[in-house]
């Protein structure tokens, strides 16, 4: 039934594609800032590659592994951003152009894969349903390398299922150059071939060989080799260990789990669709294909991880809706389309209404989220620009929130900072200093000016007004001088 297409089915997909592109463009120009600090880091690093080449001394991080062992773990992602840096003198605007490019690339490849299983009209429906998930959409509209990682993941799994080992080799080679999660591809390939063996008594060894060789070559030919091995160890092993097992605080919020209620509401269309699949499975016989089972295995992998950290919800959604399409292809096999629609239309209408209700709930939270982050990032940008014009070049600037350094470096690269991205880079290299850093920010030190001056050897700093350090600065004004202040925080000088 899927071979015969009509103008309505194709036309609906084209309309949805155009609407998504227009909305993605509109979304980027809705706010003057990025959504999160990491986006400032990514456009800045792309500029460094353009100006200094792929290998350079990362002097901006004074208390981090970046200082002597820097590795650009998203090198290919940053490389693709470089052409957009020439579009204007506004680096944030250029980054937004890059986001639109990655949005379009993801959607086109996603449509290509979904059309392998279902007709165009259903492709359009599934994409719209996926975009209604709060967690998916808020990641999708950011300048995040995981979007490129999702593209490589779904293509890699598709090549795995169809035994296209050459394509799998190319994906495996590109993955270590693009994102730190490249080892998940090996997990999926090994798991997929195990399932193939269990179900079909066949083990396609070329898939495994192509993946292993491709991943290894990608790691060895990385421009920052051998530093990329340390980066892989820190991010793939130590970060989950510290956040999920030891429960260490201070890392990015996305590395921690959230309440089950928020997880369900923020991914409402996914879990409603999962309930639909379970219901269909119980009321009718469905002979699942190997491809559907492999997509299910990959989805379950990220579903379990999503209960440990919210960042895993993005690839979870990307994998689920391809699994959904593959399941629909299996279920609708030998079932006349007219009979299926007639018998399920009432349920599908109810299903659609419930999704729209949850979408309305999510959109209200999304609007509040966007207003808050835009306001906060405007303050960070203003602070960074003030630092650029008023602080002597080469000075190391203290920052109470490790994430703020990305925005500061973007607009003020002439100064140095403490650390960037996740604090694992400081914790691993300087564990004692990291503990002092946390105590200093929370106001647990009696004489913060001595620690700043003698331990961190810092004269200038920035802190948000929500920190304990800020209140100590106000109380110990004989040792501090506030140089600049806005609603969010203050720039200070240690006297």
Image (cartoon, helix red, strand yellow):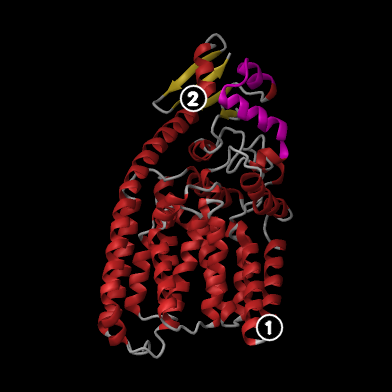
Residue 432 seen in render: yes
Residue where numbered disc 1 is placed: 203
SS under mark 1:
loop
- Whole-percent x and y of residue 27? 33, 53
Q: In this view, does 23 lie above or below 123?
A: above
Give the residues drawn in magenta, as a range: 429-454
The numbered mark at residue 390 is 2
Q: Does the magenta stretch include residue 207?
A: no
Which residue is found at the position 55% from the left and 46% from the top? 256
- Whole-percent x and y of residue 302? 55, 61
SS under mark 2:
helix
- Whole-percent x and y of residue 307? 54, 54
Which residue is found at the position 53% from the left and 22% from the top? 468
Residue 32 seen in render: no
The numbered mark at residue 425 is none
Which residue is found at the position 66% from the left and 27% from the top? 436
């Amino acid at each position: 039934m899927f071979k015969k297409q009509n103008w309505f089915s194709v036309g609906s997909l084209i309309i949805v594609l155009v609407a998504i592109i227009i909305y993605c463009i509109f979304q980027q120009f809705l706010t003057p800032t990025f959504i999160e600090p990491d986006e400032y880091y990514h456009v800045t690093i792309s500029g460094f590659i353009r100006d200094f080449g792929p290998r350079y001394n990362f002097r901006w991080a004074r208390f981090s592994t970046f200082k002597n062992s820097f590795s650009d773990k998203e090198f290919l992602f940053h490389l693709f951003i470089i052409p957009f840096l020439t579009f204007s003198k506004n680096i944030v605007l250029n980054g937004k152009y890059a986001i639109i490019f990655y949005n379009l690339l993801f959607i086109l490849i996603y449509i290509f894969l979904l059309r392998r299983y279902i007709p165009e009209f259903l492709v359009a429906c599934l994409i719209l349903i996926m975009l209604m998930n709060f967690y998916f959409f808020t990641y999708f509209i950011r300048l995040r390398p995981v979007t490129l990682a999702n593209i490589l993941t779904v293509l890699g799994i598709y090549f795995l299922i169809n035994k296209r080992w050459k394509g799998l080799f190319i994906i495996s080679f590109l993955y270590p150059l693009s994102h730190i999660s490249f080892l998940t591809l090996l997990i999926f390939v090994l798991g997929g071939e195990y399932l193939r063996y269990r179900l079909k008594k066949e083990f396609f060894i070329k898939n495994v060989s192509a993946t292993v060789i491709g991943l290894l070559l990608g790691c060895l030919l990385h421009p920052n080799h051998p530093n990329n091995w340390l980066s892989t160890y820190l991010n793939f092993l130590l970060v989950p260990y510290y956040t999920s097992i030891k429960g260490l605080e201070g890392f990015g919020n996305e590395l921690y789990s959230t309440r089950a209620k928020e997880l369900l509401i923020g991914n409402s269309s996914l879990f409603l669709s999962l309930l639909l699949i379970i219901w269909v499975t119980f009321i009718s016989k469905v002979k699942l294909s190997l491809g559907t089972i492999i997509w299910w295995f990959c989805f379950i992998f990220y579903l379990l991880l999503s209960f440990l950290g919210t960042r895993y919800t993005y690839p979870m959604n990307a994998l689920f809706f391809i699994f959904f399409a593959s399941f629909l292809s299996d279920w609708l096999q030998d079932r006349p389309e007219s009979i299926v629609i007639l018998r399920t239309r009432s349920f599908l209408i109810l299903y659609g209404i419930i999704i729209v209700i949850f979408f309305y709930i999510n959109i209200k939270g999304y609007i509040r989220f966007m207003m808050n982050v835009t306001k906060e990032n405007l303050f960070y940008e203003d602070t960074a620009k003030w630092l650029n014009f008023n602080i002597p070049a080469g000075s190391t600037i203290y920052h109470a929130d490790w994430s703020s350094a990305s925005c500061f470096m973007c607009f003020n690269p002439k100064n140095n900072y403490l650390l960037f991205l996740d604090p694992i880079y400081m914790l691993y290299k300087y564990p004692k200093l990291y503990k002092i850093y946390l105590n200093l920010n929370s106001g647990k030190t009696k004489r913060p000016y001595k620690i700043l001056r003698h331990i961190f050897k810092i004269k200038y700093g920035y802190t948000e007004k929500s920190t304990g350090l800020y209140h100590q600065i106000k109380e110990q004004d004989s040792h501090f001088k506030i140089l600049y202040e806005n609603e969010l925080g203050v720039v200070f000088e240690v006297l």
